[in-house]
Image (cartoon, helix red, strand yellow):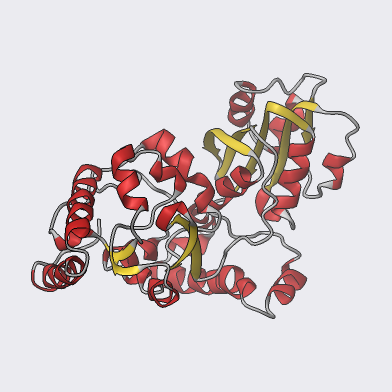
Amino acid sequence: MKNLIIGKSSQEAYDYISRYISPESAETLVVSTTNDFNILNHVSLCNAIINLSRVNDIRFINKFFESVNSKLNKDHLFICRFETFNARQHRKPIGKIPLLRSLYFGTEFIFMRVLPKLWGFKKIYFLLTRGRNRLLSKAETFGRLASCGFEIVDYETFNGLMYVVSKKIKEPDFNMNASYGPIYKMPRLGKHGKIIYVYKFRTMHPYAEYLQDYILKVHGYADTGKPANDFRLTPWGKYLRRYWLDELPQLINVVKGDLRLVGVRPISSRYAEDIPKDLLSLRLAQKPGCIPPYVSLNMKGNVEEVLEAERKYLIEKLKKSYTTDTKYFFAAIFNIIFKRKRSA
């Protein structure tokens, strides 16, 4: 097994794998396959599974990860490897030519990432590529693993391939409605804790929603109040967020009656765990909104000031329910236009 792993990877990669898994153990399954049949065909449960084929070449990635999950007991490890966007650009010679690099990889992105998400093009794409050499981001691969019941333990890159050590912590979600398109519906807490689906332009890679706990566990919150070192964001996502352009589809939620124009932001169940209980009760008693109080009050976007602004708004809203939103709406418009207030 040592010679097999070194032959398909490197001595460094073998040493890294050996830190977590004993490749020589009879209870470790070592494969190099893109077909989940070769996983399911293994008759017994394993203590660990190592797959040396690139995830980029697996036709049904989630189905493959789900099959791996079925062959592991809880807390047992799975190691896979894949090539990221950036590594792919560095690998190809054209990536060293500035103008041609942008043209080539831009065209490749449209063909391999955008078109397969459009109706009628998916079958053509997989007919031509057979699902091989797919473009994958770190966030999407990690997110797919998380959606299939794995927790990310560690990762390291060798010779342009990222090796991911993951641990089975639960059964897969079997998500048949994963979002890939430009508009994403986020599950959020609405009034009285009801789950609502808030529309936004996509600013993160697919499956990024499954990594919220992982990001906060590893990096915590930044001074802006958002998760720190958040690799889930796409390059264009940062621009859309800065100018609130990603939130324009939330007007659909306003029309539907899920949101108001002004109000505390709709939050995830995970974020709700970090909010003081008394403030959370105030929040859930009101319908959330698009324009957050910290913008109207021209306060910073860090966690402390955002929560302080929300508390001020909610208390004022209870006292003056009919005039508060109007006051906060025009204050926000003034701060955005004349004080150049931008998103955290």
Instruction: Tell whether 144 sits left or right of 245.
Output: right
Q: Quadrant where the N terminus lies?
A: top right
Q: Which residue is drawn at 30% across and 40% down?
A: 278
Instruction: Tell whether 279 sits left or right of 128.
Output: left
Q: Residue at x 23, y 54 (%)?
A: 314
Give how far across and how far down residue 288 sits, in percent: 34, 61
Q: Quick check: 266 above or below 68?
A: below
- Front residue of this view, candidates 336 and 255: 255
**Does the image show residue 87?**
no
Q: Quick check: 65 above or below 151?
A: below
Give how far across and how far down residue 316 sits, in percent: 17, 56
- Front residue of this view, candidates 97 and 134: 134
Q: Residue at x 34, y 45 (%)?
A: 281
Q: Count the marks: how many?
A: 0
Q: Quick check: 138 above or below 214?
A: below
- Front residue of this view, candidates 247 and 157: 247
Q: Quick check: 333 above or below 193?
A: below
Give how far across and how far down residue 112 sits, in percent: 60, 69
Residue 344: image quadrant is: bottom left
- Front residue of this view, candidates 303 and 99: 303
